[in-house]
Image: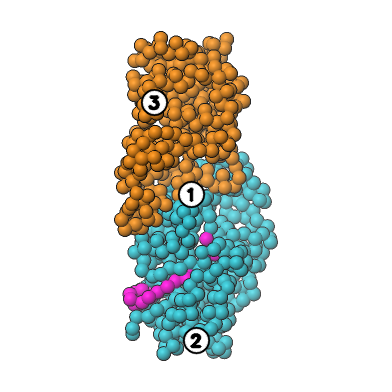
Chain colours: A orange, B cyan
Amino acid sequence: MPSSDVVVVAGGVGAARFLRALRLHDADAQVTAIVNTGDDTVVNGLHVSPDIDTVIYTLADAIDPVRGWGLRDETWTAMASLRRYAAAQVPGKYGGANGGGNAAHVNDWFNLGDRDLATHLYRTARLAAGATLHEVTAEIARAWGVRARLVPMSNDRVATRVVLDHDATAPDGRAYRAGDCVSFQEYFVRLRHAVAVRGIEFDGAAQAAALGLDELRDVGAVVIAPSNPLVSIGPVRALRGVDDALAARRDTVVGISPIVGGAALKGPADRMLRELGHEASALGVARLYAPICGAFVVDTVDAALRDDIESLGMRCIVTDTVMKDDRVGRALAATVLEAALGASR
Amino acid sequence: MPSSDVVVVAGGVGAARFLRALRLHDADAQVTAIVNTGDDTVVNGLHVSPDIDTVIYTLADAIDPVRGWGLRDETWTAMASLRRYAAAQVPGKYGGANGGGNAAHVNDWFNLGDRDLATHLYRTARLAAGATLHEVTAEIARAWGVRARLVPMSNDRVATRVVLDHDATAPDGRAYRAGDCVSFQEYFVRLRHAVAVRGIEFDGAAQAAALGLDELRDVGAVVIAPSNPLVSIGPVRALRGVDDALAARRDTVVGISPIVGGAALKGPADRMLRELGHEASALGVARLYAPICGAFVVDTVDAALRDDIESLGMRCIVTDTVMKDDRVGRALAATVLEAALGASR
């Protein structure tokens, strides 16, 4: 098989693993990843891009294999020291429904390792100097020896926010009310996604300019990575032009289900689907992707869903999708590329 | 002796040691330090207040005793990791007179330890949330158990800048030209103050509101700490109202010479005095302080300067000023307070 041009629409962990598998399968493939930045956040003054960093660290074989995020061999001195201040500030720590007190302004719950901090210091400094997020991302990727082209979905700020469906209290004591609209990280990290949501918003998406639209139109194959369809792929699709570009070349766009046997491999995708009125299954995801994907890849455990998925007008490919080792990953990458490129030949 | 109210006009290391000595001498003294913030800088997005931190860490007995700045038992993981990015960016690292390339935007020369980083993360977060530098400083001091009232000289930005007198190249290869006006930290840390200066500017001082003016007028004693008279005490004096307040109560203001036997105990004060047309001696400093100090304390090695200093209209007190141990520090504090309060009784 000749090396191929492929664009991967990517979130965090699942996408990072697929991108790594793609490289293992074909080291010479020209890979462009358009990465979700709806999770980006400013933590105590530092610009953090969680999905971009997960992709870079994974492709650099530097990701912590146990945590699944951040760097291996990490130390936590800065964050541990920060807690001195958070603890000293507020008599009734985080008292009240709105988390009164000064410590509420200080983020001591979004854990940043000392090595990881360097990435955020660098990104923050470069952005302050006028570089775009796209430029900075390329620089960080280069510093880690990553050859894939990493394109943030936009240089403009887009913030994924979720509306909580009921009252909830974070492990650190911060109380929330039903209807509160909170940042994705506040939901995902601080609340450990242990609360139902009733809505998702992509603040700024209407004004933001999508990056990578030309590639989405021109390359041989497009893959929607096995990421959360609502809060990882959703923000990319919310940008003007993305869904149109994908729909126009639907036959060579292949989606991979992040839901296997009705459950998310990682994170709250299954619950979120259910809470927002979708089916928590590969079929539920297929329905979301039917307008933009000509083919959809599901795990062998979901083989029985094939007819329902094909009735949506998509080819359904059944294979092992759980990348528990490199062999499975490589085979998945080969199958996915074949599905996309086969359609274009 | 009854416990006393005292204001100390303070820079970094010398002032911190004197403040510590003052506490050892009289644990019940009501001490207010008005601290220079002209050295404050934003390092990769984080607000750093070097003199304030040196004072807090010293009073908390947490300062690194060897380096004289930053925290003891410090680790340097974040900064070491940051160098990966700086090194990866620029083909001809820091090439050209203006330090071309992206790395020029990233500060990898202002060393921040991992524990120390927490202080800057906290300060940055609180300032971003609308707290004043005064409030944040009080919070950080409280977290370290510091009882002295620490007042930044202003909540407004004042930036000390120096004009270089000749071409120079920093150890990291960054080249400068004679006449370049650089931030104090660029001169002090990056160039290791190994270059002559021809001028000092306090950018923003004319617009900034001084803090602590009421205390400067009302308390029993004011001490000008043994700090660099030009770039540590100078910025405080450059603020509207400070010199007037001091001059109006000159009899109870005591200065301590930071120059002993013609040399600075630490830093470039002696060379700076010379380069800017002053005498690099306790007498040179006394001349700068004559308008605002009724008494001036010099080291025993400078006893011969007594007549010259008194001819400026100041009482001259000769004692051991090099705080090489707590006994000397305590005695110096007692002598200085006596000189100030004696005059008011």
Q: In the displayed structure, would residue A79 be above or below residue A200? A: below
Q: Which portion, as a residue range, is magenta?
A: B21-40
Please state which of residues A48 and B281 is positioned toward the viewer in this rendering.
Answer: A48
> Disc number at residue A45?
1
Q: Is residue B33 magenta?
A: yes
| Viewer can see residue B187 | no
Q: Is residue A29 magenta?
A: no
Secondary-structure class at tag 1: loop
Q: In the displayed structure, would residue A253 be above or below residue B27? A: above
Which residue type carries mark 1? Gly
> Disc number at residue A277?
3
* Image location (x, y in percent) of residue A267: 37, 31
* Image location (x, y in percent) of residue B55: 43, 66
> Which residue ends up furthest to the front in the rendered image?
A179
Please state which of residues A321 and A280 is positioned toward the viewer in this rendering.
Answer: A280
Secondary-structure class at tag 2: helix
Q: Residues within 10 Å of mark 3 (few under 14, many from 20)?
A: few
**Is residue B216 rendered to the left or right of residue A173?**
right
Which residue type carries mark 3? Gly
Label 3 to label 1, Cα distance in Å? 36 Å
Q: Which residue is mark 2?
A: B251
Which of labels 3 and 1 is toward the front? 3
Which of labels 2 and 1 is toward the front? 1
Labels 3 and 1: the sequence-earlier one: 1
> Disc number at residue B72?
none
Q: Are marks 2 and 1 on the same chain?
A: no
| Viewer can see residue A231 | yes
Secondary-structure class at tag 3: loop
Question: Mark 3 falls within which chain?
Answer: A
